[in-house]
Amino acid sequence: MWRRVISDEVRERIERLDLPFNRWGLDPYGISKDHLGLFLTVLGQAHKHYFRVRTRGIENVPGTGPAMLVSNHSGGLPTDGGMIVASIFFDREPPRLAHGMVEKFAQSWPFMGPWFSRVGQLPGLPEHAKRLLLDGRLLMVFPEGARGTGKLYRDRYQLERFGTGFMRIALETGVPIVPIAFIGGEEAIPTIYHAKYLAKLANAPYFPITPYILPVPLPVNCEVLYGAPMHFEGTGNEPDHVIDGYVAQVKARVEELIAEGRGAGVNHEAEAS
C-alpha cells in the first residue's frame, strides 16, 4: 500500500539510475525499487521543503563511473548523509545513487538493518566499500565517523580527526575523491549535551540533547558544496606518513569548502536561534 505514496518524480528518476535492476525491481546488492522509492520520496520532501537544500558544484560529481564522496559529519543525527543522497538524486542530471557506509550500531536497531540495505546504504566494512567502487558506484564517506556527528554545538564546524582507511581504499581502487562540505547540520540539531544513559538504551555512542530537549531537526536552510575531484597516486600500500599527507590534503579542502559555505551561504545560526 505504501507504494502509492511514491512520487511520480521519484519513480521517473529511479528509472534513469544506472543500476542493473532485474524484472523484480532488485539490483545485485539487494536494493529494491519500491523501498528506494519510498525512501527518496521522504528525503525529497525534507530536501526541498524542510531543509530547502541549496546545492553548489554538483557538476563535480561524475555522471558515470566510480568516485568517493568525502564530507564533514555534523548535526547529532545523519541529516548530512540523507541530504547528500537527496542532492545527488534530485539535483544532478542524470540522477545517481550515493551509497553510504552505515555505522555498526545503527545496523542493530530493529528493522533498520534490512531497510538500510534495501536503499543502498550498506554496513561500513572495507570489503563493501571496495566492491561498490569496483562496480562503478558512488561511495559516500565521513572520515570523522561518529566523532563528527557527536560534536557539541560549541565545536560546530571544527573537524575531528580524519581516519585514513578511506584514502587507502581510494588508492587501491584508483578512484577520484570529491570533497564535500555540508552546511546547516550543526544548526539543525544544536547538541549541547550527551545523555549517556539514553545512549546505552539506544545502543548508540551518544544521544544528543538539544536546548529544546529532543533531537528533532529544526527547519534550517542547508547547503551542500561539492569541490573538484582530487586525484592521488598510489596503490594503498604506501607508508603511513604518505597516507597521512594525502588525508591532510582532503581535510584541508573540506575545511576550505566549509569556510566558503559559511561565508557565502545563508545565516544558519540566525535561523536556528
Image (spheres, rainbow, N blue to C red):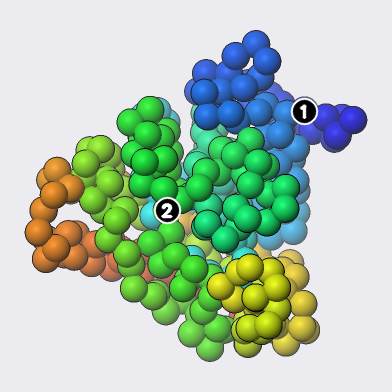
Crowding around mark 1 (Cα neighbors within 10 Å: few <14, some 14 to 19, many 20+) is few
Residue 51 visible in the snapshot: yes
Q: How many marks?
A: 2
In screen coordinates, is 169 left or right of 6? left
Compared to residue 15, the image places residue 79 above or below, namely below
Query: Separation of disc 2 and disc 1 at Cα?
Result: 30 Å
Q: Residue at x 58, y 29 (%)?
A: 30
Give residue 141's mark.
2
Quadrant showing the N terminus: top right
Tell me the quarter of the image containing the C terminus: bottom right
For the residue labelled by badge 1, is the local secondary structure a helix, a strand or a loop? helix
Left or right: residue 129 compared with residue 97: left
Amino acid at dot 1:
Asp
**Residue at (38, 62) in percent of width and height:** 143
Q: Quadrant of residue 4?
A: top right
Q: What residue lies at 39% left-to-right and 74% top-to-bottom? A: 159
Choose between 246 and 202: the one closer to the eye: 202
Q: Position of residue 166 (x, y in %)?
A: 31, 53
Query: Measured from the top left, where is residue 259 in percent x and y?
Result: 40, 72
Q: Relative to residue 213, is residue 105 depicted above or below?
A: above
The reply to whether residue 257 is in sight is: no
Pair 2/1: label in front: 2
**Which badge, 2 or 1, comes first in the chain's sequence?**
1
